[in-house]
Image: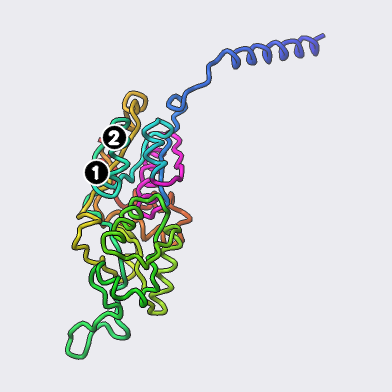
Amino acid sequence: MKKKETILTGTLLFFIFTVISLLTPVQSSAERKIVRLACADWSEAVATTNMAKTVIEEKFGYQCRIISMTADKMWESVATGKVDGMLAAWLPTTHAHYHKKFKDQLVDLGPNIIGTQIGLVIPDITVGRQTASSGARNAPYIKAESIADLKKYSNKFGRKIIGIDSEAGIMKKTREAMREYELYDYELVEGSEVSMTAELSNAIRKQRWIVVTGWEPHWIFGRWTLKFLDDPKNIFGGKETIHTMVRQGLKEDMPDVYRFLDNFNWKKKELEQLMIWIQEDKGMYPREKAQRYMRYHPDQIKSWLE
């Protein structure tokens, strides 16, 4: 008899819990405390976004998902509310066309880093010793000084400019530069940041001439001596800033996350340090490196949370 009562009680409780679960509405993304951040596959974007993700998860207890996508999809996804934000909007030049299209559909929280730059980059390395016996610096093996020089040295460069993903702002600017500087016999090679840096590394090791689409901050400037080619037509613009963009309504849905993203900013050298740490393990453990940064910079993290 007791056994039957136990079974009936268990069945009744199961029925009650089932009904309650069916009647309970599905929680929204904000109620489940999930933050979605868009991120292009660029070293500085990966480092910055993982830094933000780690702070959000450890200080607010939210889940944070990084969704990898191209630059055009980043802007569109924030503007349409498919993601909560991004920390890789290059302004005023590189992403000017995206900003013009979507600026009224998202919220600009301002720069998270200043003093950035894009352009065409070459190794600034000598063959053999860097300095002569007199102490003067030996001339680098690549003679080009400006983008205009690429026309003169097209055979040396193999008539190729090594680029990244086709929708990146720097690729659009490079196509414009190729027209303005009449580099008609050059091919802009599309690929990824990984393929671009691999080509650069191989060329430096073999002391071959190479020109790539480059930007700063980037770990390659910490590893090799590089330089931007002069841009007398100012196609790539001057110094830029990287902005944080969030969807409309985030301030009301997650005010603490909104406030943190609004406060989040750091210096170029600080970002480059994290980028180098991530690169040491070939980009495999960005979260662990961000946690390491948090341990070394507690006051800075605290300032972001005020």
Q: Which amino acid does label 1 sit on?
A: Pro
What's the magenta bit mostly, secondary-structure-wise?
helix
Residue placed most toward the observer, 284 or 194: 194
| Residue at x 36% of width, y 49% of height | 45
Q: What residue type is labelled 2?
A: Lys
Residue 239 position (above or below residue 205): above
* Left or right of 192, for residue 21: right
Report how many numbered discs are placed on residues in the image: 2
Q: What element carries label 2?
A: helix
Which corner quadrant holds the C terminus? top left
Q: In the image, residue 141 lies at what x, y percent? A: 30, 80
Find disc 2 in the rendering and name its residue: 103
Q: Distance between the residues labelled 1 and 2?
A: 15 Å
Residue 7 position (above or below residue 173): above
Q: In which quarter of the image is residue 279?
A: bottom left
Span colored in magenta: 42-71
- Mark 1 against mark 2, which lies toward the viewer? 2
Residue 89: in sight, yes or no? Answer: yes
Residue placed most toward the observer, 8 or 239: 239
Q: Which residue lies furthest to the right in this view?
A: 1
Find disc 1 in the rendering and name its residue: 111
* Left or right of 11, for residue 302: left
Q: Is mark 1 on a helix, strand or loop?
A: strand
Tell whether position 60 is magenta.
Answer: yes
Q: Residue 230 carries which label?
A: none
Q: Residue furthest bottom?
A: 133
* Left or right of 276, for residue 302: left
Residue 216: in sight, yes or no? Answer: no
State which tag comes first along the sequence, 1 or 2: 2
| Residue at x 38% of width, y 55% of height | 43
